[in-house]
Amino acid sequence: MENLLPLKFVVVGGSVAGLSAAYTLAVAGHQVVVLEAATEAQLGIPHEGGLRVPPNMARLLRMFPGTASILEEKGTKLTALEFQTAETCKIEGAMSFDPQIMSDLGSEFYLVPYYDYIVHTRRHCEMQPNISFRFGFKVRHVQTSEEGLAVVISSDGQREEGDIIVGADGRNSVVREYIMSQTREDENSDDSCSNSTAGVLALVRNIPGATVSIKISDMMEHEDLKPLTTSSTFTVWMGNGDSITGGKHGDMYVLGLTKSKSLDAVDSDLDWHQGTPSSNFLRGTCTDYNPLVRKLISLADRAHPTMQVMYHLDGYVDINECAVLVGDAAHCSPIHATYNTALAIEDAYSLGALFGHLVSRSQIPSLLKGYNELRLPRSKACATSEISAMLNNHLPPGDHRALRNQGLNHTLAIANAPDEHAEDLAAIWQGWITLTNYDAKDAVDEWWLNWGRHIKALGEDE
């Protein structure tokens, strides 16, 4: 924008949310400093894990230079979603990604190796002249003021000042803790859920989980696992109080575990540079899973346990309007499910697009308010869908599980005779289409169409 007022954004966290926000803000014309806790040497070590890229995320990623090639060359293009009972590996239901529906959505659904994506994105950020990095910067505290000064302080006393702090520091966010402390009523209040939390979101306060990555080359040595090495299906193994999802991400087969009950084996919360041997992990979890699934897990070198506390926030901006949250720091969508990374990309795009209109400091509150208005309902919709699905996948043996499986079995009949079950097929697809058809670009454009002239007037009056 020709008359843009450039700000200095301090992005805390250099993973998917942080790098994406840094890039969109830099392209909008702002100065950006990315603070990353890991050292450059640590970032050079290939990370395990993968990213689930539904159509709404894939469409946005294609706006980032070179990302389309990552999706096509490194990713797995999914053709189906399959539900199996964890104890038996019996297929209970399936959902094929109909080519016409995917075409209407504007993209396929991909599984992408985390490391390939993050290296590519970091490289493009480093090429931007208005983005700089500080590695090994472990954030201890952040502070904002009514005068508009935002300060980030590291554990060893280093400082970074800017106009706005972007909290992209994940599920254990320091920036989120600071924002929550500004509105906390008393020291003993329970901040994990806001007063507005209701329905299914109020049922889950934390989610133990884990990521496990297995080399495709190791799986190829086992005849019973070979079919998974070439599969374009994303599988959900539904257990008793837990579930595992799995799919091929490049040269790794990545499993994501979620639990709705706490077990010692996954009560720890480790970062990507740590882990627990898969043999230890198997002693305390998935004990009733089919031997094939347990064998698959045993081929991994290690598991990465996580503990996600569910913070249902009423807003993503601090009271001084100098800090804003993106990605897992903001949302309570389960980190081992489908939409958490997509939400981070949508956040990044929305923030960059909104602040691409900035011509005056007097507009900052309105633009941050717009960010809240756009992202809060979207986040709640995704989290509600994800947690509902998670609880449904975790049903214990009994009548409720039998009814669930009966419904899933119907999808197999539909798949065998789609023309005879057109209305049923549409009903099954409807919820998924609603979430994946969301377009962050259209949402920002519509918000600006409604409010832009008022915000422009603020800049003209200054």
Image (tube, grey):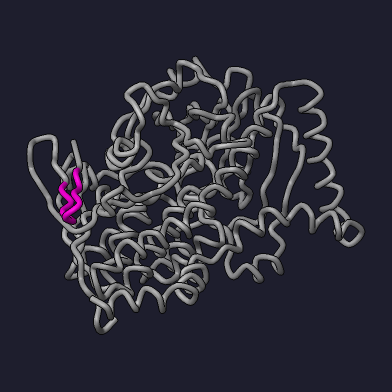
Q: State whether residue 263 is above or below residue 224.
A: above
Residue placed farthest to the right in the image? 420
Q: State whether residue 265 is above or below residue 208.
A: above
**Nearest the eye: 60 or 347:** 347
**Nearest the eye: 224 or 101:** 101
Location of the C terminus (image quadrant): bottom left
Expressed as whole percent of the image width and height from the top left, the position of residue 232 reads 61, 52
Query: Any magenta on residue 351?
Result: no
| Figure label count | 0
The boundaries of the magenta stretch are 143-151
Expressed as whole percent of the image width and height from the top left, the position of residue 123 reads 26, 62
Q: In the drawing, does residue 454 fall left or right of residue 229?
A: left
Q: Quadrant of residue 433?
A: bottom right
Q: In the drawing, does residue 22 fall left or right of residue 78?
A: left
Q: In the drawing, does residue 176 fall left or right of residue 408?
A: left
| Residue at 31% over, 30% down | 274
Expressed as whole percent of the image width and height from the top left, the position of residue 81 reads 67, 48
Residue 251 visible from this viewpoint: yes
| Residue at 72% over, 55% down | 96
Location of the N terminus (image quadrant): bottom left
Expressed as whole percent of the image width and height from the top left, the position of residue 51 reads 46, 50
| Residue at 78% over, 34% down | 404
| Residue at 41% over, 79% down | 453
